[in-house]
Image: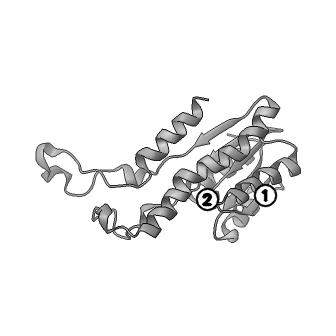
Amino acid sequence: MSGERLAGKVAIVTGGGRGLGRAMVLGLAAAGARVVTTASREAAEVEAVAREAGSDRVIPMLANVAREEDCARVVSGARDRFGRVDILVNNAGRGMKYVSQRFLTEPTRFWETDPDVWRMVIDTNVNGPFLMARAAAPVMIAAGRGRIVNISMNHATMRPCDGAASRPMGRPRRRWNPKRSSGLRILRAQASR
């Protein structure tokens, strides 16, 4: 995207400090949108992205999508600053590295996962998009327009495990991922409304 295709539009991108989130923030800003972007732990990441965008189009915020009050604060901050919210990109996520540092080479057995880690991943990856959409939807409905984009996973967790060829009939073993189906089902239900 380039130019001003999104001039006048306001976007919120959660998890905008690195990876896909960073690329989406920079792309939306380059296309003319004003962007509010969040990080849950390190403000420096989203502050660096705002500087990289090179204008006042990107507003960094520290917010945890697993907290209802943070989600409301992000949406009200975007609306108060820019007068509207047109796009919500639910990108924030906690990856499998929290479950196991070796998840790419050694499949994780779910029964060995710490319940607190499970709750953290689910709170961020499943409840977070719900809470952000819940905060943004009334603003979008009142305006008569809006788009919610949900990012579900990354390429690394979709690849087959090493040794897939040695499995019966050559079928790859899927990595266990605590957000795989529940998050997608909830997001599909939101989209149908």
Q: In this view, does 146 lie above or below 152?
A: above
Where does the N terminus fall, quadrant-wise? Answer: top right
Q: In this view, does 84 lie above or below 119?
A: above
Residue 104 occupies quadrant = bottom left
- Whole-percent x and y of residue 65? 64, 57
Amino acid type, mark 2: Ala
Left or right, residue 101 beside residue 160: right
Where does the C terminus fall, quadrant-wise? Answer: top right
Please tell me which residue is depicted at 75% across the width and 61% down the height of the picture: 60
Please state which of residues 106 and 76 is positioned toward the viewer in this rendering: 76
Amino acid type, mark 1: Ile
Any part of residue 91 in sight = no
Residues at marks 2 and 1, CA–CA distance in whole angstroms: 20 Å
Left or right, residue 159 beside residue 149: left
How crowded is the residue under tag 1: few (<14 C-alpha within 10 Å), some, or many (20+)?
Answer: many
How crowded is the residue under tag 2: few (<14 C-alpha within 10 Å), some, or many (20+)?
Answer: many
Any part of residue 61 in sight = yes
Closer to us: mark 2 or mark 1? 2
**Count of numbered labels shown in the rendering:** 2
- Whole-percent x and y of residue 94? 51, 61
Please tell me which residue is depicted at 76% across the width and 39% down the height of the picture: 138
Q: How are the colours assigned in the image?
A: one colour
Name the residue beneath numbered marker 2.
66
> Does label 2 or label 1 sit earlier along the sequence?
1
Please tell me which residue is depicted at 64% across the width and 65% down the height of the picture: 40
Q: What SS does tag 2 mark?
A: loop
Q: What SS does tag 1 mark?
A: strand
- Whole-percent x and y of residue 73? 77, 57
Left or right, residue 167 beside residue 155: left
Residue 17 occupies quadrant = bottom right
- Whole-percent x and y of residue 99? 40, 67
Name the residue beneath numbered marker 1.
59
